[in-house]
Structure formats: structure tokens, C-alpha cells
Image: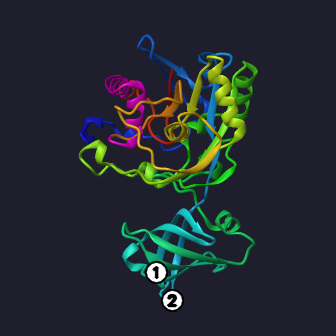
Amino acid sequence: MLKKDFWYDLPKELIAQEPAEPRDAARLMVLDRKNDRILHSVFHELPHYLEKGDLLVVNNSKVLPARLMGTKVPTGAVCELLLLRQVKGDTWECLARPGKRMQVGTKVEFGDGSLSATVDETLPDGNKYVTFQYDTETLYEKLDEFGKMPLPPYITKQLEDQSQYQTVYAKELGSAAAPTAGLHFTPQLLDTIRSRGVKVAEVTLHVGLGTFRPVSEETVEAHQMHSEWYSVSEETAKLINETRAAGHRVIAVGTTSCRTLESVWARYGKIVPCSGNTSIFIYPGIALHAIDGLITNFHLPESTLIMLIAAFYGYDKTMAAYKVAVEQKYRFFSFGDAMFIR
């Protein structure tokens, strides 16, 4: 397939700049695979579309406030680091701006200078290996003090509250971007879902920016995904296998949960407790084995995420649903509305 096959026209005003308030007030498009029906609803009505015995699988990864604005020593020039991945100890792979002016040996200070960083190496793709120095017990304390949420570039409005870019069940620090399908859930909605006999299981996949990088190759199959770390606990694997054995649905909340489960299935032929790195790329022609339903947001044109949706729902039906979403003025991308493919 060609990258251009996944293009659609999106008016700029449909790109959501802030989350719905409350979170579960976002709209919900329900796509029924059995009868090709499209229903229009609201996210807090999600329990009506779930069945007793269903299992929701959510990604509990927590976003690092990983965007740091600092100054070069001794020039005072303004620069920025975005932490992408912990390499070892206090050394991280970072996106640096302006990258060409941050050569090996460059030192950067943040805030009052109690956090600093030294560039160790420039990688082939332009990213940097950077080692941090700080006066607290962990780097995370300094990120909480000086860091900002790494919002996608299409969100130009500043957050009033950093927690707006975290799911209510986020707990495992490590993501460079939020698993955004989960942003629609509130504690009250999760309580309602559980009260209806629907279980909730957690996996971890630390979202890297590679998930959102544009597909640069003209042919879809030539694109290479970046690697991301995932983990499936013994408890979660047991819940998934019990759900499937009982004939109930396993529903992934977000493409990251989907990619986690499909990575495990691709490696083992079943769901087992495990952890590791995955660079799985799911596009039309790749069969999905681990999920029966998917809750997700509306994704960027020509992105690997819309390709995953098309693999699960079908290419023609996916592009038709996106056309309807534009016509019905759904809100798109990270803070936008949701769809439930069942």
C-alpha cells in the first residue's frame, strides 16, 4: 500500500486544543463491524456498548514532564531537550533544539542551575545521548520541578494543569507522549464499567515519539517503527486468557495497548506474562489476533496509527468513518473525540 492512500482532508479547526471537560464528555463514534453501522454517542455512554464479561486492557504508562527549556553554558543561548528514552543510569536519549549547536561536550543548565546536562554523543538520526546532573535523589524530582508536558506540535495552547495530559490510571513513569485514548476515562466512569461486570486489566507500554513520527517512505511496508518497551503482568495475562476462554471480548484501550498485546501474540502465539521491546508495525494485511475491540482517538493522516485502525476495521470502512467524522465535526487527535470499534 502507499502512504498517500491514508490521506484525508482535515479542517484545522477540528484539531482539539484542549481536552473535553469533564473528560468523559468527549463524543464517541461507535463502529459496529458486524452490521457496518455507525452510531454517534458520548464517551460517558460507553458502558451501554460494553457487555458483562468484557475485559478492557489499558496502558498504565505515565508521561514524563520531559520537555526542558534551558540555557547553554557559558553563552546563555536558549535551548531545549526532550527526553525520549533512558539509556543507562542518568544518561538519556534526547531530542535537542537547536541540535546543530549542541555538539558533544555542550553543557546546559535548567531553572536555578540545580539541574544540568552534558551532551555525550550525537546519533545518526540527530538525537543526542545526554547525561544529567542534579542535587535531588532522582532525576524525576527535577523533571517535576522544571519539566513541561511534551505536547504534540499541533497543540499550541498551554495546559492549565499538567494532569490533563495523564490518564487517571497512569502509574509507570516512562512515556514521551500520553496514551491518549485513555484520557477520556474518569474514576467514576471506571467504577460504572466495573459495576456492570466488565473487568479492567493493565499493561505498560512506554510511548516513544517514534509512534508519531511521519511515515517517510512512499510504500507503507518500507516504514521502520522505533522500539518501545512493554510489560504484561501475570495477573493481566491470566485475565485475558480467562476472558477469551469464556468467549468474552478483549477490548484494547488505545493503539498502545493493542500493540502490546499483538506484540506478545506475535512472539509467543498466545498471551503470556513478559516484558521486552517491540517495534511492531500493524497495517492492512497484518492480522490482529489478541483483541476483539478497540477504543481509540482519531489519528493524523498518513500516520502509522490510522494504518493500525485500517488493519483492524478494514481500509475502506476506516477511511469512510473518518470522512463521516470530519462531516460531523468530531474533534481530532490527542485531545479529541474517540471511536469504539466493536
Near-viewer residue (285 or 206): 285
In this orientation, does residue 161 appear?
A: no
Q: Callout 2, which amino acid?
A: Pro
The residues tagged by marks 2 and 1 sit, at their Cα atoms, a distance apart of 8 Å
Q: Residues within 10 Å of mark 2 (few under 14, many from 20)?
A: few
Near-viewer residue (302 or 88): 88
Q: Is residue 299 left or right of residue 137?
A: left
Residue occupying the point 41% across, 25% down: 313
Q: Quadrant of residue 264?
A: top right
In this orientation, does residue 178 appear?
A: yes
Q: Secondary structure at mark 2?
A: loop
Residue occupying the point 41% across, 36% down: 308
Span colored in magenta? 302-324
Near-viewer residue (204 or 81): 204
Residue 206, percent from left and from top: 57, 51
Q: Callout 1, which amino acid?
A: Ala
Magenta stretch, main secondary structure, is helix
Q: Judge whether 261 appears above or below 177 on screen.
A: above
* Direction top: furthest residue: 35
Q: Is residue 294 magenta?
A: no
Q: Which mark is residue 77?
A: 1
Residue matched to label 2: 74
Q: Is residue 303 magenta?
A: yes
Residue occupying the point 51% across, 52% down: 228
Residue 297, percent from left and from top: 48, 35
Q: Secondary structure at mark 1?
A: loop
Q: Which mark is residue 232?
A: none
Residue 269, percent from left and from top: 53, 34
Q: Is residue 53 left or right of residue 214?
A: right
